[in-house]
Amino acid sequence: MVEQELAAGQAALRARPDSGCRTVLRLHRALRWLQLFLEGLRSGDPRTSVLCTDAYNASLAAHHPWVIRKAATLAFCALPSREAFLEIMNVGTAEEAVAVLGEAIPYIRDVYGITQELFESHKLLDLP
């Protein structure tokens, strides 16, 4: 997909709002947020709103205008507790859920790393 879209040139790629590369880049950024949030959940901090805000600020916030950043931060205040998140995972006890996160996070990190390297090598990390 990257090669196909780059064949038309960088300018053409940046002009296309329906670009697959732009869509994957947005998903890539969201995956980074998810990774950081899940790592935070695994850490034991019960304040999910703080965990989510920290993950957002470290990943997605730089790509959003001020009003979206403020709205997102406000929405994070409505998140349930860490215990509720772990229960929703429906894998057993909180300790078992943390163990599942420990198994999943390395795969998330790997996928993120592969995509980061691909987009970096083609200078696509700053697509609009």
Image (tube, helix red, strand yellow):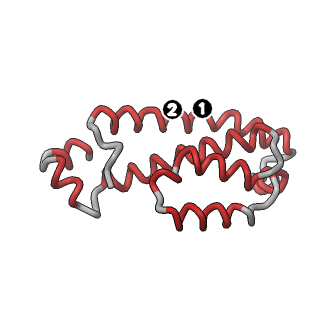
- Give the residue at x 62% y 46%: 55
Write down the residue under mark 2. 110
Amino acid type at circle 1 is Pro
Furthest residue in direction left, as rendered: 8
Write down the residue under mark 1. 106
Dots 1, 2 in contact, CB < 8 A: yes
- Give the residue at x 76% y 35%: 99
In this picture, residue 14 sits left or right of residue 113: left
Q: In which quarter of the image is the C terminus?
A: bottom left
In this picture, residue 104 sits left or right of residue 95: left
- Give the residue at x 74% y 66%: 78
Q: Where is residue 10 in the image (x, y as percent from the top left)?
A: 18, 47
Q: Spatial distance from mark 1 to mark 2, Cα to Cα?
A: 6 Å
Q: Nearer the viewer, residue 55 or 34?
A: 55
Q: Where is residue 40 in the image (x, y as percent from the top left)?
A: 71, 41
Image quarter of residue 63:
bottom left
Q: Nearer the viewer, residue 3 or 56?
A: 56
Secondary structure of residue under mark 1: helix
Secondary structure of residue under mark 2: helix
Furthest residue in direction front, as rendered: 66
